[in-house]
Image (cartoon, rainbow, N blue to C red):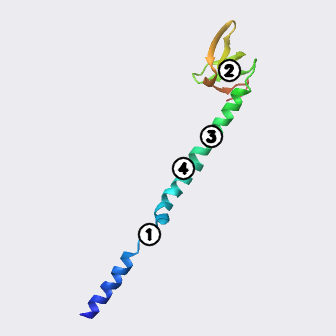
């Protein structure tokens, strides 16, 4: 009878050991770290680059809007950009709607 009770007592002691709070949080911290480096950091870099591009925008540059309109910058204010999309045809576009610069002969 004693041979049956001793292994049961050892099994109860081993099962009673619980992981610490830090051990429980490590997978969550690890997943957040991966998410930060793979998603958040590249997005922040892209956003800073775009803000720098918009701040340096000047007359005469060719740009593409988010809607796909290609035009030449004829005026820049804090909030708006004047684009000439055809000879003597000008439109006013929100500055944050400008996506990229465009140079003749390039694919992007």
27 or 90: nearer the viewer:
27
92 or 11: nearer the viewer:
11
**Label 4 to label 1, Cα distance in Å?**
25 Å
Q: Which mark is residue 19?
A: 1
Residue 15 drawn above or below residue 34: below
Dot placed on the residue nearer the N-terminal end, 4 or 1: 1
Task: Name the residue located 57 percent from the left edge and 49 percent from the top edge.
Answer: 36
Q: Under tag 2, what secondary structure?
A: loop
**Label 4 to label 2, Cα distance in Å?**
34 Å
16 or 52: nearer the viewer:
16
Q: Which mark is residue 44?
A: 3
Asked which quadrant contains residue 14, the reply is bottom left
- Which residue in the structure is indicated by mark 4? 35
**Label 2 to label 1, Cα distance in Å?**
56 Å
**Label 3 to label 2, Cα distance in Å?**
22 Å
Residue farthest toward the front in the current orientation of the protein? 21
Q: Under tag 1, what secondary structure?
A: loop
Asked which quadrant contains residue 71, the reply is top right
Q: Which of label 1 and label 3 is nearer to you?
A: 1
Q: Under tag 3, what secondary structure?
A: helix
* Quarter of the image that includes the C terminus: top right
- Which residue in the structure is indicated by mark 2? 78
**Label 3 to label 4, Cα distance in Å?**
13 Å
Task: Name the residue located 50 percent from the left edge and 61 percent from the top edge.
Answer: 26
Task: Name the residue located 59 percent from the left edge and 24 percent from the top edge.
Answer: 66
* Quarter of the image that includes the N terminus: bottom left
Residue 78 drawn above or below residue 91: below
Residue farthest toward the top in the current orientation of the protein? 88
């Amino acid at each position: 009878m004693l041979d049956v009770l001793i292994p049961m007592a050892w099994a109860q002691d081993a099962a009673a050991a619980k992981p610490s709070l830090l051990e429980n949080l490590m997978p969550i911290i690890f997943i957040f770290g991966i998410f930060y480096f793979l998603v958040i950091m590249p997005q922040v870099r892209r956003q800073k680059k775009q803000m720098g591009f918009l701040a340096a925008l000047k007359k005469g540059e060719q740009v593409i809007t988010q809607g796909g309109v290609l035009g030449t910058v004829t005026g820049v204010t804090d909030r708006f950009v004047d684009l000439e999309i055809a000879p003597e045809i000008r439109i006013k576009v929100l500055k944050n709607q400008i996506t990229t610069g465009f140079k003749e002969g390039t694919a992007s």
